[in-house]
Image: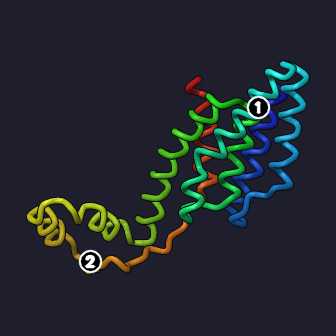
């Protein structure tokens, strides 16, 4: 119960700061990790610490490559690691999967809101047979470029996707 309250508190604070300031603070995440380690040591001994460290490691590992490629910030990675340290590796994996789906939906919404969804879809599907692309271009009233140097410059608050994934993971388990 204590861990669940802490997960919800960390998630709520991180969601607020990610949406309002586009930051997820170490001053929120680090104490939660130490509390998780202490709690799991107290309730499960060394096996509990291993459980917590496994969740932390998996949470960090799952988002490490997207972070290295510039797809997300370090706070997002540390948030999933923190959730993993609190709830363990299986929960972290479910939160990651659900968060990835939520992140895709958020990205589509952000592209739509910034009137770049059609451009992104054309770029994604530019490798399919030519007749389909021609039909897509004919149906569009918008002009667009499909050049390789085109950038969309839209960032999404991925912490919101992780928090959504965490909430979904509670319902899935």
Res 166 seen here: yes
Instruction: Return the x and y of residue 26 as percentages of the image width and height.
Output: 81, 55
**Which quadrant would residue 119 be assigned to in this image?**
bottom left
Disc 2 packing (10 Å; few <14; some 14–19; many ≥20):
few
Q: CA distance from mark 1 to mark 2?
A: 51 Å
- In the rendered view, would you say 89 is above or below 151? above
- SS class, disc 1: helix
Q: Residue at 45% x, 67% y: name it.
A: 113
- Label 1 vs 2, first from the N-terminus: 1
Q: In front: 167, or 55? A: 55
Name the residue carrying label 2: 142
Residues under numbered marks 1 and 2 in contact, where contact means CB atoms less than 8 Å apart: no
Quadrant showing the C terminus: top right
| Quadrant of the image occupied by residue 123 | bottom left
For the N terminus, the quadrant is top right
Q: Is residue 168 visible?
A: no
- Left or right: 57 in relation to 125: right
Tell me: residue 63, above or below residue 74. Answer: above
Q: Nearer the viewer, mark 1 or mark 2?
A: 1
Q: Which residue is mark 1?
A: 52
What residue is drawn where x is 69% and y is 52%?
15
Instruction: Identify the residue at horizontal 44%, vertical 74% (top origin).
Output: 152
- In the displayed structure, 142 sits above or below 76; it is below
Among the 4 quarters of the image, the one containing residue 83? top right
Image location of residue 82, percent across then percent down? 74, 43
């Amino acid at each position: 119960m204590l861990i669940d309250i802490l997960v919800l508190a960390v998630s709520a604070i991180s969601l607020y700061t990610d949406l309002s300031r586009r930051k997820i603070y170490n001053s929120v995440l680090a104490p939660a990790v130490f509390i998780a380690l202490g709690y799991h040591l107290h309730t499960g001994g060394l096996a509990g610490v291993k459980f917590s460290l496994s969740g932390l490691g998996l949470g960090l590992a799952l988002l490490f490559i997207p972070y290295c490629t510039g797809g997300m910030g370090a706070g997002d990675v540390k948030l999933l690691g923190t959730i993993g340290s609190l709830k363990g590796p299986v929960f972290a994996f479910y939160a990651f999967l659900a968060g990835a789906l939520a992140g895709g939906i958020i990205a589509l919404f952000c592209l739509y809101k910034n009137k770049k969804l059609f451009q992104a879809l054309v770029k994604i599907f530019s490798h399919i047979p030519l007749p389909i692309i021609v039909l897509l271009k004919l149906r569009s009233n918008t002009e667009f470029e499909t050049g390789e140097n085109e950038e969309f410059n839209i960032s999404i608050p991925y912490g919101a996707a992780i928090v959504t994934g965490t909430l979904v993971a509670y319902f899935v388990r």
